[in-house]
Structures are given as C-alpha cells and as structure tokens.
C-alpha cells in the first residue's frame, strides 16, 4: 500500500479526507513551536507521556491516550519527563450527499471546540496499531483493510465527540472544504511569520487575486490576513516573554516586527497589557 497519500471514506453522510503522511512519521514532538492547522489533527501517544499546551492550558497524555485538535487552535508539545512517540493524523470533514445523516449529530461540535482529550481505549489502541502495521502491506486488499479500520476509529472519535464535545473548550470556527491552497496558506504563516510577509506574495503562491486570498483566509480562520499574522506573532512573543530572558526589543524583532512601537501597539491591543506587564505576570 506504500505510495498512497490520501484516503477518502464515509461514515454515513460524513465525508472524511485523511492524509497518510502522519502514519509514516511517528516521532517525539517535544519542543515544537506554537502553531495551528487549518485541518483537524488527531495525536495518539504510541509510547511515553506527551505534554501539549493550548494557550494557558496544559494537558498530559499518557501512552495510548489521544487528543483531537480542532482547526485554528494554537498548540505546542512541551518537553516531558519521559520521551514520547506520537502518531499524528490530519483530516478534513464535510457533509456528503448520501448516507445516514450522522453529520447533523456532530456539526455543532465540529465548529465549537478547541480540543478534546481521549483516554486510553483498548479497542482504539488495537485499531491504531493495526493501521500502522498495514501501511506498507503488499496485500491486495490492504487499502480496504486500512479503510475499514479507519472507519471504526473515526466512528469511535465521533461517538466521543457527540457525548462530550459540549464540555470541551469553546471556539467558533466556520466549517469549510479544505483543498491544496489551505495547506499553502497554513505553511506560509507557520514557517514565515517572522519575516516580512505580504498578501501579494501569498496570493502569487496561490495563483489568486489579493481579495480572493483574503476571503479564503477569512473563511478558514475567521480573520483577515493581517489579523491572522498579528495573532501568530503575538502568540509567539508571549511564549518568548514567559520562557526566555531575551529583551523585549529582541523578541519584537524575532517575531517579525521592524519597529518596537509597532510590536508594542499590536501586543497591547491583542492582550490588553504591555509586553513588560505581561512578562511580569507570566514569567516562569
């Protein structure tokens, strides 16, 4: 089955498009930078303990437990006492035209959460490890075996979501169908936010006009290009303020601001505090 990059399957009228890349890159994610994604991410801890941070919330995941991260949620993996290996799956969901209407049961939960924790479940663990073992199988029916296991896995995920989704951290985000351009936008922000980014440059990468690009960003994140860039930069600055001894001027430059005044204004507008005051209250 080697070479398959995307798997599409349905659970009733829930259409799922899943990237296979994560299955071949099980890794220790500790020390990652704060980032977000335009798709859902499901992180399953294969071994060890993983610590993941959502804004000010810390969640510790033990072996065989998992977390579902919703689109647009800022998060990062922190260093833990033991090394951990995490399997990460990215996927998108949309409403299909045919099949039992399961989408209605999960629709509200899909647009009103930050993340959801999944405790250890022997059935899910068996499914995950079975999926991993099937990736490089040469069996004629390997793809169908993979799809069957994924269907059972996502049935479990959606069942948990309908039962407990209302207790997760609230966050409103419009649902949409994601395509290749979403990946380009996401990587552009996450990898280059500290540089002199422009809507013109991003538009040229997408082969779209500036207004079309800005509309797409608003559809994905609910904010404009400039607002999205500012939020990522300030989130990164908050992390540096609390976790390093770098000067505030150094931090402002590191996250992409050419002038301290511009950084100061943006930081206070987003947080309600000056960088100095925020550091005093949050320094570790």
Image (tube, rainbow, N blue to C red):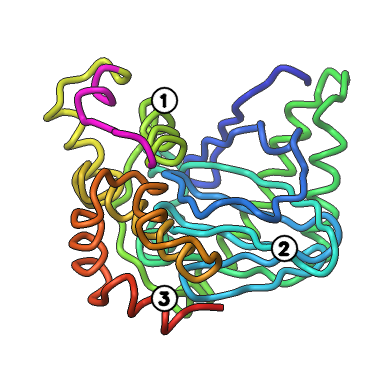
Tag count in the figure?
3
Instruction: Kindly indicate the quadrant of the structure image that contains residue 252.
Output: bottom left
The x and y percentages for residue 43 are 66, 54
List the residue tagged with mark 3. Answer: 279
Q: Is residue 121 left or right of residue 52?
A: right
Q: Is residue 1 above or below residue 114?
A: above
Q: Which mark is residue 28?
A: none
List the residue tagged with mark 2. Answer: 79
Q: CA distance from mark 1 to mark 3?
A: 38 Å
Q: Is residue 32 above or below residue 141?
A: below
Q: Residue at x 23, y 76 (%)?
A: 272
Quarter of the image with the C terminus is: bottom right
Name the front one of labels 2 and 1: 2
Q: CA distance from mark 3 to mark 2?
A: 21 Å
Q: Are marks 3 and 2 in contact (CB under 8 Å)?
A: no
The x and y percentages for residue 24 are 76, 33
Residue 203 magenta-highlighted:
yes
Q: Is residue 199 above or below residue 1?
A: below
Query: Which residues lie in the magenta part?
Result: 194-204
Q: Residue at x 77, y 42 (%)?
A: 26
Q: Nearer the viewer, residue 262 or 33?
A: 262
Label 3 Cα crowd, 10 Å radius (few <14 / some 14-19 / many 20+): many
List the residue tagged with mark 1. Answer: 180
Q: Nearer the viewer, residue 105 or 182?
A: 182
């Amino acid at each position: 089955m080697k070479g398959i990059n995307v798997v599409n399957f349905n659970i009733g009228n829930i259409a799922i498009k899943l990237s296979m890349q994560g299955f071949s890159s099980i890794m220790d994610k500790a020390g990652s930078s704060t980032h977000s994604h335009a798709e859902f991410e499901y992180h399953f801890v294969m071994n060890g303990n993983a610590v993941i941070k959502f804004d000010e919330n810390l969640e510790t995941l033990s072996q065989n437990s998992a977390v579902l991260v919703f689109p647009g949620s800022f998060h990062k993996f922190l260093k833990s006492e033991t090394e951990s290996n995490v399997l990460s799956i990215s996927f998108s969901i949309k409403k299909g035209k045919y099949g039992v209407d399961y989408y209605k049961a999960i629709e509200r939960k899909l647009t009103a959460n930050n993340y959801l924790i999944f405790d250890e479940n022997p059935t899910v663990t068996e499914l995950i490890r079975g999926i991993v073992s099937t990736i490089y199988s040469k069996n004629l029916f390997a793809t169908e075996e993979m799809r069957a296991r994924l269907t059972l896995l996502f049935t479990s995920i959606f069942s948990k979501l309908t039962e407990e989704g209302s207790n997760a951290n609230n966050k409103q985000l419009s649902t949409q169908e994601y395509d290749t351009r979403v990946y380009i936008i996401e990587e552009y922000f996450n990898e280059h936010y500290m540089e002199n980014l422009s809507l013109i440059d991003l538009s040229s990468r997408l082969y779209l006009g500036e207004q079309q690009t800005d509309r797409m960003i608003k559809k994905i994140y609910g904010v404009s290009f400039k607002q999205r860039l500012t939020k990522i930069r300030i989130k990164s600055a908050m992390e540096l303020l609390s976790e390093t001894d770098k000067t505030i001027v150094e931090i402002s430059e590191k996250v992409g601001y050419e002038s301290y005044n511009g950084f100061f204004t943006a930081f206070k507008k987003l947080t309600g505090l000056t960088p100095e005051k925020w550091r005093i209250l949050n320094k570790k």
